[in-house]
Amino acid sequence: MINTTNPAAVASASGFAEAELLAGLWPLIVSARTELLLFAAAMVAYFALFSQRAPTNPKMKAKKFKVAEDDYKEEDYPTDACMKVNSLEPKECAQVEKALQVAFDAGDYRSVLRCWNTMKKFQSMPVVSLSHVVETMQRFKKDTPFILRELKTFCKAFPSECDMACINDLLESLAKRLDSELMEKIVEMLPSVNLKMDERSYEVFLNMYFTTRSFQEVKTLVSQMKAKQIAFTTRSSMVVIKTALKTNSFDEAVQCFRELKSTWSSATPSMAPSHVVSQLVELACKEHKLSEFLSELQGLPISEDVVNTMLSECIRQKDFLLASSVEQLARESGCKFTDATYSLLIKGLATDPVRVQALFDEMVEKSVEVTSELASSVLGFCAQTSNVQLAEKLFGYMKPKQLPVLSAFIRFFADCEQYEKACDIYEHDVVPLQATAAAAAPSQGQRSLQTDARMERSLMNAALKCGRAHLAKNLLSASPSDIAKHITMIRNCGARATSRVLSASSSHWSAAALT
């Protein structure tokens, strides 16, 4: 028992207990010294590596960002503690303007806002891009009312210098980012700073609405412009035309095109974009109103594709007079005729042999290359009018080497009872062509240049008609299983036998009558 009444005894007992406790802890510390050292090293490494990094906790990030935003209150935009803004020299103002641009290019938006706050207190309007300032505010999550207040303060600070041109530059920048909400709010703010939208402002809005395919907004804006008698710029008119084309409003597109055309001087007709003219022509053809629209193209440069589109429509409508009008328009505009254009013209003017002959002579004079399509158009006209002479001129000028074209000529001459000519083309042009192909590729030559069955039947008929039995025999032996060729030969033999019998009978009865 410890005597609690004796202080010396109590102290002695307490010291003994502490010594006993320490004696028990020390072995424990010694046994865990490795773990303790590792823990201490880990703590040192953690603080060394991560003490400078931003917190990863989203709440901490939001808190830090809010602190950053609070740094940009207007009262915290210091210029220089020892310098009054109103006392800035022009050179110093220029330095601030340059500093803002450099800061924006470098992404230092804090410095941009500080320079902006300094500029608002200049005595004369600074050279500054409002679009850069607004973009910086948006990056710092400033709401629309805050941005509008800043713009309004700036415009009122420099009322005679901050005109609509500055606002239009800002609107155009916002339109590229499709920020229609802020743009509309800025427009609502304009009356408070004694400004109003002009032609360029409407142009910017029209382009933005068309880009976002808000065609109804475009039409609404056009109605406002007409009501306020705002002139349409070239770009505005083009947007209206393209909107009408997208919505298939042909009459509206033509009306706007007519108004736009009236603003052009005679010296600059090339201002009409070719793709818009092409789309207008296509829509006119689709609506079957090409004849009405043709007069709108007077005096404008027209591409070959546009001319060909109009000629194709004339052929579909079988309108000879319209085709003539298109040809005249094309010649007046200086359009260069190609083989495709001549082909369509010959089809469209096929009812006028004189015009077709003139076109052919023009082709020869200009040394136009005759393609298979053009040759087909000319042969089609020749077959329609039985114009063998023109076909012979075409063959002589063209000197074709393509088997499909040669086959077309053979069929044409055989159908026109020019049997000798058909057989000559086969023997002098087709056979050497097949031989050359067979020599170049023995395994594929005959297959690659096989003549079509229709042409072979026409050729066999021509060979039998003009007495070239060897040619008919060769054609028959080339494909002995072709029943159609046998039928053709039997018919021709029967026709010749009948002709001989009739001829003999006629001679007999004539002799008997004389007797």
Image (cartoon, rainbow, N blue to C red):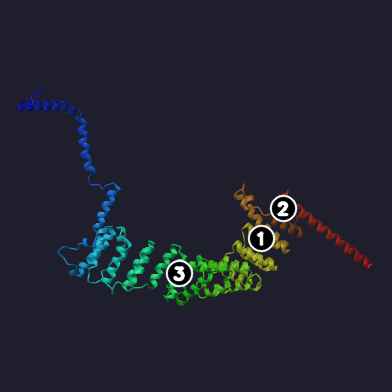
Specify the amino acid type for callout 3. Answer: Thr
Front disc: 1 or 2: 1
Can I make out residue 368 in this image?
no
- Sequence order check: which comes first, mark 1 or mark 2? 1
Front disc: 3 or 2: 3
Q: Position of residue 84 (x, y in %)?
A: 17, 67
Specify the amino acid type for callout 2. Answer: Leu
- Find disc 3 in the rendering and name its residue: 220
Q: Residue at x 24, y 57 (%)?
A: 70
Specify the amino acid type for callout 1. Answer: Ala
Q: Which of 216/276 is in front? A: 216
Q: Which quadrant does the N terminus fall into?
A: top left
> Would you identify the image quadrant in which residue 311 lies?
bottom right
Rendered view: 22 above or below 305: above
- Callout 2: SS: helix
- Find disc 2 in the rendering and name its residue: 475
Q: Which of 182/402 is in front? A: 182
Q: Position of residue 277 (x, y in %)?
A: 50, 69
Q: Which quadrant does the C terminus fall into?
A: bottom right
Distance (Cα) linking label 3 and label 1 = 58 Å
- Callout 1: SS: helix
Q: Identify the residue at the far right of this view.
A: 515
Q: Residue at x 19, y 30 (%)?
A: 33
Q: Residue at x 93, y 68 (%)?
A: 514
- Find disc 1 in the rendering and name its residue: 408
Distance (Cα) linking label 3 and label 2 = 74 Å
- Sequence order check: which comes first, mark 3 or mark 1? 3
